[in-house]
């Protein structure tokens, strides 16, 4: 139950902070603190889904969940960094952190793809949350490779977060095989 709730609430909070950032044209202290709260469970989120969802994934799914978690541990740190340094926008944060931020973005994408692929191979149902999650990762990857406005990255994050929320909903409300 805790995994399902976290998988719904944390990505929903992250999505809210993206909307607030877009609405205000940059970061605010309140938005960054809310973002930090959203990021706190994210390093453990895919590990939790891996642990409770049936049928169980293979080792690649576990590795992917771990890589995704490592990336979000770093992203939580970058939120605290933005608060401490008074960084006004995502672009300014990225320009300060540059390569290290990009590397962790790549780790997030690789980990998410490994997790999603493993879950699809294991036969997770419903499949559409995994495909939504993967489509968000794909859009994030594509937009990292081509010059594009920050708002488009937000769309990729929204798709990814919607997939996670749907996975959480499935954990909470989907009937398990053999249950009444």
Image (cartoon, grey):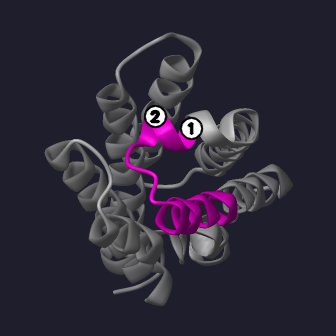
Label 1 Cα crowd, 10 Å radius (few <14 / some 14-19 / many 20+): some
Using the image as rendered, state which of residue 124 and residue 180 is in the foreground. Answer: 124
Q: Which quadrant is the C terminus positioned in?
A: bottom left
Question: Would residue 145 be found to the left or right of residue 153 on screen?
Answer: right
Provide the secondary structure element on which disc 2 rests.
helix
Residue at 17 percent of width and 49 percent of height: 24
Mark 1 lies on residue: 94
Point out the stretch of residues depicted in magenta.
Answer: 72-94
Question: Would residue 16 be found to the left or right of residue 55 on screen?
Answer: left
Residue at 46 percent of width and 71 percent of height: 36
Label 2 Cα crowd, 10 Å radius (few <14 / some 14-19 / many 20+): some
The image position of residue 179, as x and y in percent, is 41, 85
Mark 2 lies on residue: 91
From the viewer's perspective, is residue 24 above or below residue 40? above
From the viewer's perspective, is residue 33 above or below residue 147? below
Q: CA distance from mark 1 to mark 2?
A: 5 Å
Q: Residue 151 is drawn in which quadrant?
A: top left
Q: Is residue 36 magenta?
A: no
Residue at 57 percent of width and 70 percent of height: 45
The image position of residue 156, as x and y in percent, is 39, 34
Q: Main secondary structure of the magenta part?
A: helix
Q: Are the residues tagged 1 and 2 within 8 Å (C-beta)?
A: yes
Using the image as rendered, state which of residue 76 and residue 108 is in the foreground. Answer: 76
The image position of residue 118, as x and y in percent, is 69, 47
From the viewer's perspective, is residue 75 above or below residue 154? below
Asked whether residue 8 is in view, the answer is no
Provide the secondary structure element on which disc 1 rests.
helix
Residue at 35 percent of width and 21 percent of height: 149
The image position of residue 143, as x and y in percent, is 48, 20
């Amino acid at each position: 139950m805790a995994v399902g709730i976290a998988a719904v609430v944390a990505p929903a909070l992250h999505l809210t902070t993206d909307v607030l950032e877009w609405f205000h044209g940059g970061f605010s202290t309140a938005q960054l603190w809310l973002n930090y709260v959203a990021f706190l469970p994210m390093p453990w989120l895919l590990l939790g889904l891996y642990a409770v969802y049936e049928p169980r994934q293979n080792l690649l799914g576990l590795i992917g969940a771990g890589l995704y978690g490592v990336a979000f541990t770093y992203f939580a740190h970058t939120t605290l960094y933005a608060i401490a340094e008074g960084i006004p926008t995502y672009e300014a944060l990225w320009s300060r952190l540059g390569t290290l931020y990009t590397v962790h973005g790549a780790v997030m994408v690789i980990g998410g793809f490994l997790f999603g692929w493993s879950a699809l191979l294991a036969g997770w149902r419903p499949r559409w949350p995994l495909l939504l999650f993967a489509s968000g990762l794909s859009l994030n990857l594509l937009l990292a490779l081509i010059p594009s406005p920050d708002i488009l990255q937000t769309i990729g994050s929204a798709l990814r977060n919607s997939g996670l929320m749907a996975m959480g909903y499935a954990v909470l409300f989907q009937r398990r095989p053999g249950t009444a």
